[in-house]
Image (cartoon, grey):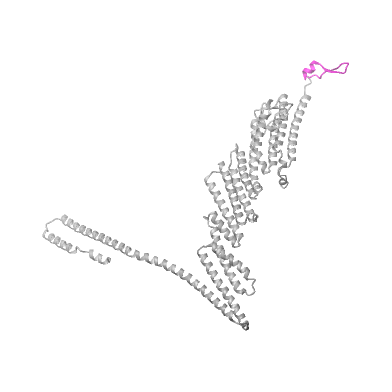
Amino acid sequence: MDSSSTSSRFRFRDLPEMENSTQSDTASDASSVVSSDRDDDSDLQSMTGRGIKHLCSELLELKAASNGDFHRHIFANYSSFIRVFEEVGRVERELLQLRNHVSTQKRLVNDLVDGIYSKVLSKESMDSVIEESEWDEPLLISELESHKNDVLETLDILLSENRIDEALAILELEDENFQRMQFEEDCPLDELRLFDSAISERKGLLTQQLTMLAENPRISAAELQKALVGLCRLGDSHLATNLLLKYYHSRIASGIHKLKASKSLLDRVYIRELSKFVFSKISQAARSFVMLYGETSPYAPEVVKWTRQETKVFAACFDEYVKSISEISGGLSTAVEAMQFAISFCCLLETQRLVLQPYLIKHIRPCMEDVLNIHLDHFTKVIGIFTATDTWVLGRYLVSGIMNEQCSSMVVGQQPEYCLLTNSGRKFVTLLQAITVDVSPLLSLEIEGSILRGLMNLFKKYIDILERAINCETTVTEKSSSRINLAESVQQQVSILSNLSSLEQLFSNMVRSIFKGASDTNSELRKSHPGGYQPKEIDGCIFFIQEASLGLRSLFCEQFINKVMSLKTSYKLPEICIDGQGTVSRTEETRKTF
């Protein structure tokens, strides 16, 4: 129903009644001239209200009628729209069938033409050899043209429908045909080159499709492998390798980002999960490469370069983690534990002929050396703390109680099981033992020289403290030097020298036990690293400690002689009596003096 008719039907239908009402009201107003002004105002307001209500009801009726008409139009036209949509789909299917039918008819016509030409040529006599030769080349050209059109049309359909495997099969077959036909004498080379150019163009389109598929960030590993196999079949192995490495690089980068977001750097589980994730992805990339090119194929240079780059990326994350370890207590052991996790997962790749351990060690060695030096500097302060309260009194300590079992059989002062040490000496040996337990795994990083120098500096620091204790006349002026108990009596000084002698023996055996067999491990690898461990460094370290110990003994002897030579004149020289048999004897007074 039309809206105009609806409007006309409802608009002002009660107008006569309103006029009658107005006329009656006017008449009543004329007759009642004696009414008050208040009654007049109320009558006007009631008339206006009735008019407004009337208009509102009419507008609501118009709105309801309009909505009804709108819905009826929609329901009436919806079925027509559906029929048109279905008709368009049917027309498209008919066009596709018609296209296939046309191509089939075209192929049949070409086959019929070729058959007619062959029959005509077979009936001609030998006298028309010249004419036959004139028809020969156009016939071959028409056969190649027909074949070209059919192949290109089929390829276009397959590419539009994303039927990659079928398109690859046709392209491989046409490559074989091209290799065979270009050596035939009666084949038109110009047409053949045009056909090969058209095939190359389709190859480019298929390569572009496979590349876009491989670069899709949501592609699965199986789909990626299928796309890369297709690129290898097209002869673009270099592109396939690059896409493979790009895929796994993006997976490693996103995995590292997610792991950093989910776990704190202070969490020990972080570095273990990171090592496992990164090297497992490198392993997966290596397996994918083997699936593409076979077990016997060596890794391409770009694959080897990529694995080293990813190892460097992991080393940067490892360095960040190690630097985040701020606590001194347990920090070295935590860093060593992280290093062991990294190396253990890295070594698993050797079963796949990927030796990345040397490159990993090369990049994590600097940060591990920094951690080692920081903790060794801290231990020098610890030595100053526990020697400040030593009274320089010797005690007998069981060797196996302060050393490991490898050193328990050493002989010190004719006592195979005990050694004489002061309180600070016992604590110093215990500290050295704890340090060696932590730093022993660092030998795999080829930083034996740094470890030796660190232990040697700690021992030299302790000897310096003992020297200050013996040299009682020296006053400590440096604020950084801790106060110690001076060894004022000869007995205390002798205790210090005995303590030093035991420490020298223990330190020598400890160092040799740490580096036992180190000179025979990876000897060829160590030759290429001049800064690495050399067996002569152990002898040099021990010789340095022996010289420092000998210097302390010389200082004691010098001070003792000076004391003896500076005795007051009240002391009598010893009276020596020689009997008839040549025996030397001292008087009782002399013996008491000494």
- Among the 4 quarters of the image, the one containing residue 111: bottom right
Where, quadrant-wise, is the N terminus in this rendering?
bottom left
Left or right, 407 with respect to 11, comes to right
Measured along the vertical axis of the image, is residue 472 above or below residue 221?
above
Counting from the top left corner in percent of width and height, residue 387 is at 66, 30
- Camera-side residue of 547 and 242: 242
Counting from the top left corner in percent of width and height, residue 186 is at 63, 75
- Camera-side residue of 589 and 11: 11
- Indicate whether residue 257 is drawn in magenta: no
- Camera-side residue of 85 and 532: 85
Left or right, 185 with respect to 593, comes to left
- Residue 212 in sight in this render: yes
Counting from the top left corner in percent of width and height, residue 560 is at 76, 26
- Camera-side residue of 486 and 449: 449
Left or right, 303 with respect to 549, comes to left
Please provide the residue range marked out in magenta.
571-594
Measured along the vertical axis of the image, is residue 259 above or below residue 550?
below
Q: Residue furthest bottom?
A: 127
Left or right, 204 with respect to 446, comes to left
Measured along the vertical axis of the image, is residue 521 above or below residue 478?
below
- Indicate whether residue 592 is drawn in magenta: yes
- Residue 530 in sight in this render: no
Counting from the top left corner in percent of width and height, residue 201 is at 57, 67
Measured along the vertical axis of the image, is residue 142 above or below residue 230?
below
